[in-house]
Image: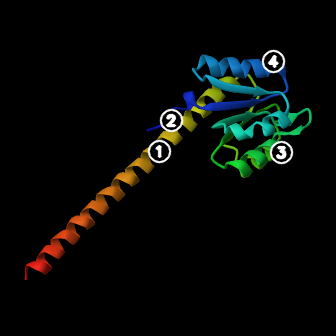
């Protein structure tokens, strides 16, 4: 059965209190209930044992960069989706985060919250498609196993009837 992202754990790492509250409000308004917030990258890293499904990261943090957090996340579980939401507008920074496994990089501007909602919805859709594909693969394998078993029974019946 598909696990709805709205019932999943989301980490938000943001050192700007205004944006931290804005993102948290957006997520809870959209129905996401398990949202944990961190203003320091080390606090997030120390809580990765909780295995979040999604992490929304600022790139520039007081004690380092979101890249450090991204590397830790991907080393623990590469299936954790990471979205950067940052004021850092340099193209090479955005490309670097994507190269190391971020799902998307969103620049903080007047459309950032709308874009964040769209990206999260895309993650949900991709997860549902992936899980549906896995379920179909299991069904196909079970059907194939059953067909082979029936074929073996028929062959055995033919062999022992002569």
The Cα atoms of the two marked residues, 4 and 1, are separated by 36 Å
The Cα atoms of the two marked residues, 2 and 1, are separated by 9 Å
Classed neighbour count for the residue bearing mark 3: other residues with Cα under 10 Å, few (<14), some (14–19), many (≥20): few
Residue 46 vs residue 110, the one in the foreground? 46
N-terminal of the two: label 2 or label 3?
A: 2
User: Which residue lies under the disc numbered 1?
Assistant: 131
**Residue depicted at 43% across the width and 44% down the height:** 132
Classed neighbour count for the residue bearing mark 4: other residues with Cα under 10 Å, few (<14), some (14–19), many (≥20): few
| Image quarter in which the N terminus is found | top left
Image marks 1 and 3: residues in contact by CB distance under 8 Å: no
Image marks 2 and 4: residues in contact by CB distance under 8 Å: no
N-terminal of the two: label 2 or label 1?
A: 2
Classed neighbour count for the residue bearing mark 1: other residues with Cα under 10 Å, few (<14), some (14–19), many (≥20): some
Q: Residue furthest front?
A: 160
Q: Which mark is residue 18?
A: 4
The Cα atoms of the two marked residues, 4 and 3, are separated by 23 Å
Q: Nearer the viewer, mark 2 or mark 4?
A: 2
Helix, strand or loop at label 3? It is helix
Q: Is residue 157 left or right of residue 58?
A: left
User: Which residue lies under the disc numbered 2?
Assistant: 3
| Image quarter in which the C terminus is found | bottom left
**Residue depicted at 50% across the width and 35% down the height:** 3
N-terminal of the two: label 4 or label 3?
A: 4
User: Which residue lies under the disc numbered 3?
Assistant: 68
Q: Nearer the viewer, mark 4 or mark 1?
A: 1
**Residue depicted at 48% across the width and 39% down the height:** 128
N-terminal of the two: label 1 or label 3?
A: 3
Do we see residue 105 in this rendering?
no
Helix, strand or loop at label 1? It is helix
């Amino acid at each position: 059965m598909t696990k709805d992202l709205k019932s999943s754990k989301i980490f938000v790492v943001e050192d700007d209190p205004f944006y931290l509250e804005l993102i948290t409000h957006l997520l809870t308004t959209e129905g996401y209930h398990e949202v944990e917030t961190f203003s320091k990258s080390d606090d997030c890293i120390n809580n990765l044992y909780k295995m979040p499904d999604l992490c929304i990261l600022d790139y520039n943090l007081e004690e380092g960069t979101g890249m450090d957090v991204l590397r830790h996340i991907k080393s623990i579980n590469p299936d954790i989706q990471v979205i950067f939401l940052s004021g850092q507008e340099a193209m090479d920074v955005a490309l670097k985060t994507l190269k190391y496994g971020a799902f998307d990089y969103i620049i903080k501007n007047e459309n950032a919250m709308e874009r964040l909602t769209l990206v999260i919805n895309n993650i949900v859709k991709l997860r549902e498609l992936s899980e549906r594909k896995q379920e179909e693969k299991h069904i196909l394998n079970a059907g194939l196993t059953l067909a082979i078993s029936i074929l073996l029974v028929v062959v055995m019946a033919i062999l022992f009837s002569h």
